Structures are given as structure tokens and as C-alpha cells.
Image (spheres, helix red, strand yellow):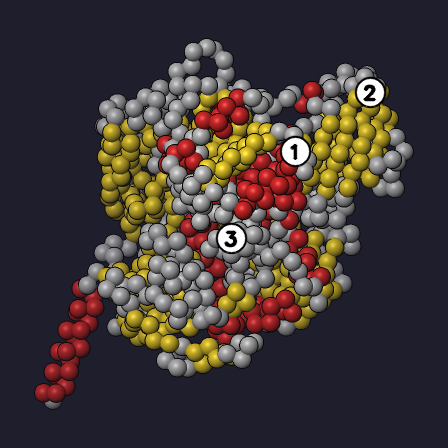
């Protein structure tokens, strides 16, 4: 009896210690690797996930075999220990997993903070990773009584910097987190009474937070903002308004922020807002049309001009791990223009591709409205990853810039990667070829002819060990074969960053001053190439509307002769195009001759008219096809992740199927927040009303049997997914292990689409967990169907992939089957 009481006291003591401590650090675990391949493509392999999803994964133990790879090597679990800073380091888990356990004396909620990993399964539920080790991803997780398991996936840089993990037990179920803020500056002369700021609300409770408010208070001014819903056991970065109209003294000002529910205080904290001196660099925020989140851009303002001449606009894109405000501060204010730096949504973001590209375009339009620059003097520059951004944005949108100046940049992600690796540059099969074609828009080398209309200044340090000078020399050699207006400079002894002159280099701005964008009506020849009209379609007065073969390169070389009232030239892989006829007066008979085919005669009806032409057997006058593929909506799966998208999860089917849909939606929302500083709405299928969410992108999780929103959005879609079966028109696949991701246009919108993440059963749904579509430059076609076997067999596990036709049909599309 005494022994029993002693044991009871000991257990009680240990339990009390576990509950009384605020943070538990993981210092021991098991590591295994290499065991997976993820990158900038739709294809992925993961031996551990394959076994996990199949229910065949044995509990890890030191020395246990995970699998034998294709070279005959046995991949076994190894014991790993953290150092004094709680970091797991070494090669035991590179390109593999770390396995951690925590014994909880009861069921409870905790907050998991991990760094250095790509994602983690916590008791089987996927959660976003913190691969860049920022340390502010605090994810609510539900612990069960007894043993709790964490499998953290680590990429090829896993041993560099280490992996850390801890659990904390917050005192409040709902609270404000102020580590990851998006904050504007108070700027003299600008409107400061309704500034948007972004901060995180963490919800460790079992209920969705609705109708909560945040009150901000600074210098006696209070503002109350109703915030959007925050998911149960989740977090969301929300926008709040700050009235800083009475802040007049330069320096930091404390802003009290209070979380309220029906007027009752739930939590309180403090954030700082900076009031800048006149003429100093500053940050401003805006609400993004992509997802309704708070984003920011930075400005190095123009010096007081000596004339009434409109300013030039210098658009500067930053490098990896560089904040936009730091980019702006690298520039001394210019007398003849203003420097504006967008964010790419995060310091790493999307390599200025995908949503980084869209962020740049959003900020460019904001800057034009804010500063009213001379429309002929808009310039693009950037350093490192921003040098890539300059090459990419310059080639993709050549009509927007008078000149570009990439510094220390690499041209394409197929030769220079980052944490997500490189885009593969070759395919071993027709299936892989069609998957990789989805990344063609990232291939700057295929778009170099678009630089013809631009001045190009290339700068690079010849001792750069981060981005080799070979990339600058490569582009110099390419430009030297056709370009008549480029300058090249190597900074002798210059490393990757050799001071602010790495970007604020006077000869760059001298070069800019010699260049201007001509009026469209002054341009008589257009030479333009694109891989995807949905990304880039227009050059001056000519626009590619549709392609013959989707995502292969399309090119137009067209001349306009105002004296003879002719438009003539050649096209390649173009099914439809349009011409803006601003150069011709109403009543003019214009003759259009393309590809040496029969001429089309067209009489201009009104000023600034646009004529549409379609290629059938020859070229004929057509109309804008708003519901068919066009520049506003051309497809590829990732295109749906915009237009203030909403994530809609299925609630039908089995408990496991419904659980997967919600968990996957939350996982994507967490990843979107981490990678894109994003905030996205998550709703149940039964709460989705097409009219309420009109013209918004939709990401649908589930299938026809489990999702109540399926028929509302996909009634006419030729892709049908149900339990045990998947059909694409007349092609069928059976089994419970099939997954699909595809896009379909919303029939009630001219712009928005639906991205569908689906499966035919538990195994199929789980196979769809991977979300490397958030990697910058990763290519996904319109449709991809694969089985769980892809995780171990690679391309052999892909059943079907390809693109719908211009009318969104299967018959006129291009698909490859295995």
C-alpha cells in the first residue's frame, strides 16, 4: 500500500510539473532519410507518407527499416538529439523526417512551434511548416491522452540551421499574436486616419470564432474593426484599422490592441507604429484583391522636384530574405522620380512568380494612382532573387517598362533554385513532358526576344558566390546576338552584396534617363512571345487571346502601317488574337494579312476599337469569347487561387472523409499564410452560396458524394469524382486510392474559377495532401489524376494529365494517359 501511495505521489508530481510548465522542448527523437522528393512540379514522391496513408507504417524505433531505395540502400531510423539550443542537426533526416513523441496525461490543446521543416503530421493531421525558421508559426494542435506523434518532413537543407520543436500551453484559449505583423508607417502629408494593419489571432478552442472585434487605440484615437472568422484549432492573420491622424511626432508610437467579443475584453496587447520624418523611406499597406489580406509596399520618396514635370517611377523588387522597406532604404531619394518596392508577399514569397508576380502588378497599379508618374518613364530593377524578378517581369510584361536593370540575378528557376529546388529542364516521358509544360511561363530564356523593346542594363559582382556571375554572362551572350540597346557591368571584386550601390548604382539611373516607353500608336512593329495568355498576353496594340496548343510558346510578329492602312505579319501557336485600332480613324478600311493567308478587310466603326480574329481554316473576324479560355481566365490549376478565393470543405461522407476535407483546407490556409502572408476564408460546403461568393475563386475539397457544393459549381464539368470511381468524359478509373486536382471555370463569372482537390476514397484524399502548388514557379496543368502509387513509383502513378480545349471541353483539349 505504501509503495502504491508513493507511486501515486510521484505520478501526481510529474503530472503537476507537466501542466505547470509553460513550454515543453523536444530534445530527443528519431530521424530517417532521404525518403522523399518534393519540388517545383506536380510530381512528388514520399515513401513515409505512402506507408502512412496505406496504414502500413510501423512505429519508428532506432535501427528499424523504413524502406530499401532503388539503389538497394536500406533507409533506417536513427536516434537524434538536440543541442543546448534545442536544435536537431545533422544528416540523419536530410530529405527525410524527424519523429517526435509527447506523452500527455490527458486530452488537451497545445500550441506547436516548429522551425526548419516543410510540414508536419501531428497525430496524422497535416500542418504547415516553417522552412525558413522564422519562429512565429504557432499552430494550435489537439493532443490526445497518452502518446502523441509528430512526423516532421525536412527538405534538403534540413541539416543547415537545424530543426526545433516545442509545445506551449497558453493560459487563454483565444489570444492575439504580435510576432508577425504587417504594419504601415504614419507619413506626413498622407491620409493617416484609416491605416490597415495585419496581426494574428490564435484560436485554441473547439469553436469557430465569429463576430469578434479588435479595438486599436493610439494618441487618443480609437477604432473598432470587426474581424473575419477564425477556424477552430487554427489561426488567421486579420486586418484591423488604426486611426493615427493625431500622431505627429516622429518615432515609434505604441498602439493598444484589444480583442473583443460583444464588448467584453478577450485579450489585449500592444504593437508599435512608426511615424517617419518627411522625405524618409516609408511603408504603406493595402487590401489585396487576391485574398482580402493586408499587404504592404515601401517607398523611397522623390526629392522635392525643381519643376512641375511628372516623376519617373522606379519599381524595385527585393532579394530573398529582404524586406521591401529595407529594399527602399537602399536607395537615396531621387530628384526625378520615386522608388516603390513591392513585397512578393513575403521576404522569400514566390520568387516574383505566381502570386509574387500578382503582388507586383497590384502594387504597380497602386503606385501609378498614388504618384501619378510620367507613363513613359517607368523602370524595373532588382537584386538577387529580385534580379530574377527583373528578368522575369521584364520578359513577361515588356510593355510596362522603359528599361530594366537586373543586378546579381539568375534568369530562370530551371538552373537556379532555392529551398524548393529547381524546375526540371527535361522530361523522360510524354506524361512528364505535359506536366513540365505547365511551368513554361517561368522559362525566361524562351522569352528573351521580348526584351527587344526595352533598354537592359545588366549588373553583377564578378566575385559573387551566391549567384554566380555566369548567369549575367549567359544573358550578356544571349542579348548580344540580337539586342541593340543593352549595357553590361561587372563590379570588380564585388560579392553578392557590395553595398547599396549593388542596387543604387548611378549608371543604372543614367541609363534609365535615356529611355522612355513610346505611345502604342507610335509603335509600328510588335514581336511578342508568351507561354500562357492567362499570365501575359498583350504587347502594345496586339493581344494573344487563345493558343492552338496550350502552354506551348506562342509568338506574334506583326507590323502596322498607318499609311497603307495595313496590319500584317506572322503568328505561331495562336488560335485567336485581337488588335487595338487606336491608330486608325473611324471609317478607315483596314486590311489584315496574317501567316500569308487570305486578307481580312475590316472597317473601323469607332475610336479606340478592338477587333478580334480567330483562326479556323484561315483568319476571320470574331468576337471576344468571355466564357471560353481567354487572357482573363486561361486555366492551369493554380489560376483559381485568386479573386479573393474561399476554401470550401466537404462535410458529407464518412467521418474520416469529412475530417480530411477540413484538415486539408486548414493545412492549405496555414501554408498560404506562411508563404504568402495570406488570409483566406474557410467555410463548410453547406454554407456556400454562389451568389454570396459571386466572382470569387473557390477551392473545393471533396468529391461529388461528399461535397454539397459540388453540383453548385461543377454541374457541367466533364470530370466526375465519386467514391470508388473517377471519370473524364468517356475515360474511367476505379479504386479508392485515386486523387485529382483540376480547374473549372465558374459559369456565373467571367473571371473566377474553381480549383478542385478530390479523391475517390480515404487513400485518394490523403494522396492529395501535398500542396507544392504554393512553391513559386511550380507547374500544374488543368487536370491531373494520379493514384497513391505515385508517392512511391513517381510518374508511373500518374493516370492522366493535360489541358482542356479553348471551349473547356475534353474533346478539343490535350491529355496524356498512362
Q: Earlier in the sequence, mark 1 or mark 3?
A: 3
As drawn, 416 above or below 703:
above
**Which residue was labeled with disc 3?**
417
Quarter occupied by residue 787: bottom right
Q: Find residue 680 and report its horizontal and vertical position in percent.
A: 46, 47
* SS class, disc 2: loop
Q: Earlier in the sequence, mark 2 or mark 3?
A: 3
Q: Nearer the viewer, mark 1 or mark 3?
A: 1
Q: Residue 273 versus residue 698: which sits nearer the camera?
A: 273
Q: Can the viewer see residue 693?
A: no
Q: Is residue 415 visible?
A: yes
Q: Which residue is mark 2?
A: 565
Among numbered discs 2 and 1, the one appearing first in the sequence = 1
- On screen, residue 557 above or below 675: above
Mark 3 residue crowding within 10 angstroms, few (<14) / some (14–19) / many (20+): some
The C terminus lies in which quarter of the figure?
Answer: bottom right
> Furthest-front residue in view?
492
Residue 549 is situated, as x and y percent measured from the top left of the image, at 75, 49
Kindly identify which residue carries mark 1: 483
Vertical position of residue 413 compared to residue 535: above or below: below
Distance between the alpha carbons at the discs numbered 2 and 1: 29 Å
Marks 2 and 3 sit apart, C-alpha to C-alpha, by 48 Å
- Evaluate if marks 2 and 1 touch, with contact meaning CB atoms under 8 Å apart: no
Amino acid at each position: 500500500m505504501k509503495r502504491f501511495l508513493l507511486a501515486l505521489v510521484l505520478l501526481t508530481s510529474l503530472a503537476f510539473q507537466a501542466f505547470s510548465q509553460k513550454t515543453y522542448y523536444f530534445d530527443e527523437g528519431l530521424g530517417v532519410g532521404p525518403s522523399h522528393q518534393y519540388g517545383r512540379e506536380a510530381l512528388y514522391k514520399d515513401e513515409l507518407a505512402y506507408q502512412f496513408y496505406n496504414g502500413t507504417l510501423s512505429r519508428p524505433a532506432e535501427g528499424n527499416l523504413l524502406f530499401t531505395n532503388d539503389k538497394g540502400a536500406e533507409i533506417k531510423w536513427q536516434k537524434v538529439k538536440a543541442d543546448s539550443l534545442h536544435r536537431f542537426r545533422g544528416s540523419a533526416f536530410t530529405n527525410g523526417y524527424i519523429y517526435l513523441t509527447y506523452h500527455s496525461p490527458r486530452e488537451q490543446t497545445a500550441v506547436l512551434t516548429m522551425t526548419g521543416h516543410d510540414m508536419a503530421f501531428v497525430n496524422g493531421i497535416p500542418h504547415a511548416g516553417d522552412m525558413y525558421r522564422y519562429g512565429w508559426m504557432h499552430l494550435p494542435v489537439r493532443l490526445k491522452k497518452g502518446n502523441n506523434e509528430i512526423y516532421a518532413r525536412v527538405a534538403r537543407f534540413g541539416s543547415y540551421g537545424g530543426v526545433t520543436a516545442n509545445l506551449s500551453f497558453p493560459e487563454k484559449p483565444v489570444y492575439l499574436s504580435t510576432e508577425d505583423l504587417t504594419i504601415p508607417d504614419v507619413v506626413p502629408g498622407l491620409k493617416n486616419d484609416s491605416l490597415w494593419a495585419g496581426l494574428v489571432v490564435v484560436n485554441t478552442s473547439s469553436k469557430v470564432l465569429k463576430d469578434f472585434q479588435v479595438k486599436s487605440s493610439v494618441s487618443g484615437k480609437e477604432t473598432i474593426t470587426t474581424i473575419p472568422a477564425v477556424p477552430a484549432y487554427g489561426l488567421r492573420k486579420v486586418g484591423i484599422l488604426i486611426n493615427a491622424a493625431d500622431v505627429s511626432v516622429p518615432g515609434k508610437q505604441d498602439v493598444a490592441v484589444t480583442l473583443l467579443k460583444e464588448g467584453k475584453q478577450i485579450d489585449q496587447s500592444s504593437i508599435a507604429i512608426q511615424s517617419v520624418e518627411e522625405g524618409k523611406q516609408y511603408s504603406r499597406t493595402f487590401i489585396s484583391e487576391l485574398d482580402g489580406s493586408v499587404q504592404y509596399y515601401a517607398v523611397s520618396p522623390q526629392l522635392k522636384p525643381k519643376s512641375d514635370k511628372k516623376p519617373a517611377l522606379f519599381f524595385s523588387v527585393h532579394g530573398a530574405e529582404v524586406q521591401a522597406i529595407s529594399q527602399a532604404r537602399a536607395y537615396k531619394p531621387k530628384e526625378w522620380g520615386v522608388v516603390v518596392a513591392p513585397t512578393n508577399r513575403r521576404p522569400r514569397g514566390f520568387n516574383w512568380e505566381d502570386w509574387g508576380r500578382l503582388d507586383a502588378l497590384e502594387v504597380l497599379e497602386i503606385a501609378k494612382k498614388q504618384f501619378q508618374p510620367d507613363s513613359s518613364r517607368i523602370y524595373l530593377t532588382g537584386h538577387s532573387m529580385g534580379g530574377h524578378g527583373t528578368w522575369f517581369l521584364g520578359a513577361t510584361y515588356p510593355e510596362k517598362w522603359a528599361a530594366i536593370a537586373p543586378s546579381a540575378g539568375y534568369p530562370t528557376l530551371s538552373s537556379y533554385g532555392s529551398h524548393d529546388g529547381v524546375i526540371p529542364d527535361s522530361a523522360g516521358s510524354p506524361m512528364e513532358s505535359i506536366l513540365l509544360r505547365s511551368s513554361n511561363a517561368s522559362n525566361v530564356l524562351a522569352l528573351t526576344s521580348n526584351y527587344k523593346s526595352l533598354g537592359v542594363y545588366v549588373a553583377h559582382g564578378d566575385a559573387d558566390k551566391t549567384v554566380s556571375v555566369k548567369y549575367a554572362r549567359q544573358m550578356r551572350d544571349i542579348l548580344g546576338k540580337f539586342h541593340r540597346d543593352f549595357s553590361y557591368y561587372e563590379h570588380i571584386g564585388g560579392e553578392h552584396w557590395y553595398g547599396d550601390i549593388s542596387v543604387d548604382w548611378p549608371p543604372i539611373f543614367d541609363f534609365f534617363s535615356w529611355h522612355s516607353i513610346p505611345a502604342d500608336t507610335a509603335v509600328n512593329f510588335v514581336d511578342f512571345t508568351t507561354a500562357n495568355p492567362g499570365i501575359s498576353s498583350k504587347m502594345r496594340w496586339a493581344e494573344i487571346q487563345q493558343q492552338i496548343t496550350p502552354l506551348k510558346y506562342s509568338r506574334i510578329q506583326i507590323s502596322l502601317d498607318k499609311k497603307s492602312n495595313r496590319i500584317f505579319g506572322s503568328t505561331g501557336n495562336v488560335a485567336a488574337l485581337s488588335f487595338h485600332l487606336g491608330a486608325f480613324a473611324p471609317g478607315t478600311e483596314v486590311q489584315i494579312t496574317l501567316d500569308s493567308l487570305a486578307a481580312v478587310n475590316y472597317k473601323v466603326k469607332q475610336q479606340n476599337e478592338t477587333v478580334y480574329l480567330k483562326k479556323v481554316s484561315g483568319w476571320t473576324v470574331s468576337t471576344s469569347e468571355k466564357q471560353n479560355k481567354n487572357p482573363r481566365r486561361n486555366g492551369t490549376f493554380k489560376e483559381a487561387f485568386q479573386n479573393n478565393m474561399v476554401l470550401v470543405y466537404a462535410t458529407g461522407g464518412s467521418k474520416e472523409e469529412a475530417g480530411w476535407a477540413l484538415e486539408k483546407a486548414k493545412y492549405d490556409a496555414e501554408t498560404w499564410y506562411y508563404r504568402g502572408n495570406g488570409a483566406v476564408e474557410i467555410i463548410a460546403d453547406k454554407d456556400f452560396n454562389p451568389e454570396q461568393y459571386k466572382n470569387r475563386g473557390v477551392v473545393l475539397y471533396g468529391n461529388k458524394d461528399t461535397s454539397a457544393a459540388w453540383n453548385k459549381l461543377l454541374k457541367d464539368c466533364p470530370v466526375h469524382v465519386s467514391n470508388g470511381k473517377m471519370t473524364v468524359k468517356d475515360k474511367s478509373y476505379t479504386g479508392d486510392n485515386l486523387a485529382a486536382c483540376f480547374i473549372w471555370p465558374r459559369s456565373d463569372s467571367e473571371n473566377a474559377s474553381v480549383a478542385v482537390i478530390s479523391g475517390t476514397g480515404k487513400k485518394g484524399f490523403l494522396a492529395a495532401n501535398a500542396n507544392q502548388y504554393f512553391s513559386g514557379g511550380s507547374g500544374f496543368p488543368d487536370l491531373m489524376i494520379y493514384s497513391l502509387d505515385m508517392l512511391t513509383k513517381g510518374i508511373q502513378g500518374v493516370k492522366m494529365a493535360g489541358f482542356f480545349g479553348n471551349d473547356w471541353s475534353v474533346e478539343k483539349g490535350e491529355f496524356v494517359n498512362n
